Image (cartoon, grey):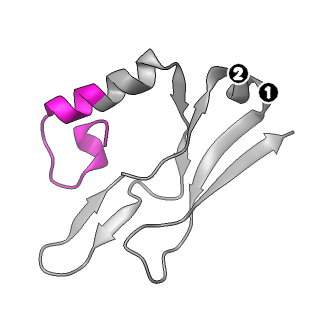
Amino acid sequence: FRSPSERLGCESFSPTMFAYSNFIENNSLVDLPLEGASFTWFRDSGLPSMSRIDRALVSLDWEEHFENVSQRVLPRDISDHCPLLLVAGVV
């Protein structure tokens, strides 16, 4: 995850968050908007745990080629991870 808001109960930035965000910025990647939920991973046993660890990253060129692109969180059935659907408004 990139920020404390992407993990339930997390209140501060860690060195890993900074490194991951720097990697995305240094490689000119775009973290597409997430629709439908705030988290993409859930663990239900014991203490509830939720994070946004799944995402689609695209290049700036790719984003310019497609309009209104976002990621939609779909319901999870078996896995702890929610499937993501990449939605492009205009191709």
- Quadrant of res 8: bottom left
Compute the Cα span from label 1 to label 2: 6 Å
Left or right: 15, with 83 as reference point:
left
- Residue 64, given in percent of the width and then of the height, sits at 74, 23
Residue 27 x, y percent position in the rendering: 48, 20
Residue situated in front as seen by the camera: 66 or 62: 62
Q: 68 above or below 37?
A: above
Vertical arrangement, residue 29 with respect to residue 34, above or below: above
Q: Which residue is drawn at 54% across and 40% down?
A: 33
Tell me the residue at 45%/83% (across/down). Answer: 78
Which stretch is magenta? Answer: 1-19
Residue at label 2?
Answer: 61
Q: Does the magenta stretch include residue 28?
A: no
Mark number displayed over residue 17: none
Is residue 76 placed above or below 73 in the rendered structure? below
Identify the residue shown where x is 12% and y is 73%. 47
* Marking on residue 65: 1
Disc 1 is placed on an element classified as helix
**Dot 1 crowding, Cα within 10 Å, few <14, some 14–19, many 20+:** few
> Dot 2: what SS?
helix
Amino acid type, callout 1: His
Q: Quadrant of the C terminus?
A: top right
Q: Residue at x 32, y 68 (%)?
A: 42
